[in-house]
Image (cartoon, rainbow, N blue to C red):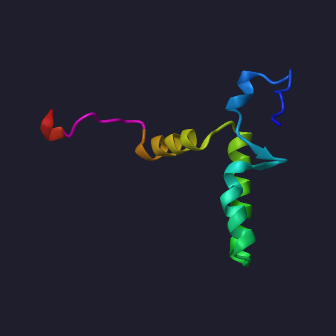
Amino acid sequence: MARAPSPDAHWRDSARYPRFFIIDARAALPVMLALVHIRLWTFGLALLAMIFFAILHRYGFTVPVFCRWVGSLLAGPRKVAAPWWLR
């Protein structure tokens, strides 16, 4: 039988990223890989993924926003709309 939603639940909570205690759910794939393929490098990969997502959460970034931010850092401040020979 399905449970009724909590009266304290709010529609804004649907935008939150799922977490398993303190571990971000987006780090589940490296953690599952570490559990299935038990090697030191897979545990290191899972640990790095958890640290990466914790740092992103600490600074308020999501993965798409972080990728756009890195792309804008790599592109530099000057954005050219068209090549010089087309102007």
Residue 42 occupies quadrant: bottom right
Q: Is residue 78 magenta?
A: yes
Report whether 3 appears left or right of 69: right
Percent from the top left, x then y, of residue 74? 45, 47
Magenta segment boundaries in residue numbering: 77-83
Residue 73 visible = yes
Q: Is residue 39 above or below residue 10?
A: below
Q: Residue furthest bottom?
A: 39
Percent from the top left, x then y, of residue 19? 77, 45
Percent from the top left, x then y, of residue 83? 20, 40
Q: Is residue 47 above or below residue 52?
A: below
Residue 85 occupies quadrant: top left
Which residue sits at x=70%, y=56%?
Answer: 28
Which of the pair 57/12 is nearer the observer? 12
Report whether 65 appears left or right of 20: left
Q: Is residue 47 magenta?
A: no
| Quadrant of the frame with the C terminus | top left
Residue 9 occupies quadrant: top right
Q: What secondary structure characterizes most of the magenta part? A: loop
Percent from the top left, x then y, of residue 73? 49, 43
Q: Is residue 74 above or below residue 30?
A: above
Which residue sits at x=35%, y=35%?
Answer: 79
